[in-house]
Amino acid sequence: MKSAALVSLILAAVQAGEVQSNGQNLTSVSFKIDGTDPVTPLVVNGGWQSFVFGKPGDVAIPWFLLLGFNNVEVTVTDAFLPGDSFDVYVNQNYILSTPPVPKADSPDVSDPDITSKPGSGYSNAKFNLQSANSLIQMIPNVSPWKGGAAFIRADTILKRCNYFSKPMILVEEPHLPRDRAETNCKRLDGRLEDLSESNVHKMIEVVEACLGRNQPVWYGKVKWGHLLKKKLVEKPLHCFAFFVNNHGEGDLDYLPCDTPLPTVCEGNFIPLLTGPAKDEQ
């Protein structure tokens, strides 16, 4: 079906109230209805992007174009009302299908960070892309709600450094700004490591072992009054970052919040049995 015709059918279904409950933001996806196939860039490390779909067999819109990045992890997840599942194509070649899940009237969850987790009750899948130039399309194979909205994202494959003495992980890549740093931890089902007097020595060990000295990282909340008493000139849009100084001591710097940095995470990670070692997930 031509994309313009598919758009018209989906918008008609929204107006009729048939699809709206399965994605309140169906009409928020922006593209031109000009008879051409809608294509939008898939932004690596840019978070979730939405797409809309109709009946089984019709290509969802928009299509996503990944350019200039090698070796990324792509995640596709349903949201809102459970029951939809998708076939995924890259450059018109079938890659995989998201698993079937039972249709349910609830929960109506709009947050893809929740619906993309294993065991969420929503259909989702991950796959790696090696090619820098890829056109990604989703086709619903089950659509009990006559259409809806779902999500896709692309992330640099995590490069992390495990440390044996504490379930603490330093994510070396991708580097992210402060407001998106927790994304790295969520991908590992963890959270940002808070900085306090009780864990600062472990933080020093991890950061120095994995990155060396004078290499700042983002972390969670700061509960380290000693360093916060330092006289730092307040600057707009600046945030505290942790680093190990030349004396091997923990220290804080005041950097622009949009500076891309590694991230220190905590969670129920399985620590390595030996010292710091780097691996890719």
Image (spheres, rainbow, N blue to C red):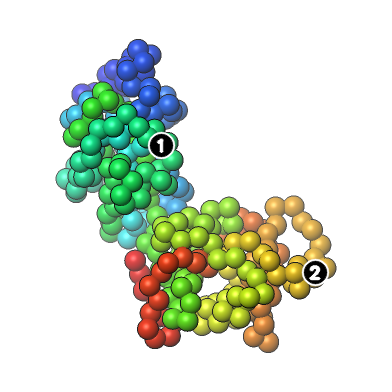
Picture coordinates of residue 13, whole percent (x, y): 32, 17
Residue 8 versus residue 109 in the image, above or below: above
Identify which residue is drawn at 28% across, 57% down.
128
Q: Quadrant of residue 212?
A: bottom right
Question: Which mark is on residue 81?
Answer: none
Cα separation, mark 1 vs mark 2, equals 42 Å
| Residue 35 seen from this side | no
Question: Which mark is on residue 229?
Answer: 2
Between residue 116 and residue 120, name the one nearer to us. 120
Picture coordinates of residue 36, whole percent (x, y): 30, 26
Residue 246 versus residue 281 in the image, above or below: below
Q: Quadrant of the C terminus?
A: bottom left
Identify which residue is drawn at 80% across, 69% down.
229
Question: Which mark is on residue 109?
Answer: 1
**Kind of residue sitting beneath label 1:** Val
Q: Are marks 1 and 2 in contact (CB under 8 Å)?
A: no
| Secondary-structure class at tag 2 | loop
Identify which residue is drawn at 64% across, 56% down.
257
Picture coordinates of residue 22, whole percent (x, y): 35, 27
Q: Quadrant of residue 124?
A: top left
Between residue 175 and residue 263, name the one nearer to us. 263
| Secondary-structure class at tag 1 | loop
Left or right: residue 49 compared with residue 136:
right
Identify which residue is drawn at 79% across, 58% down.
234
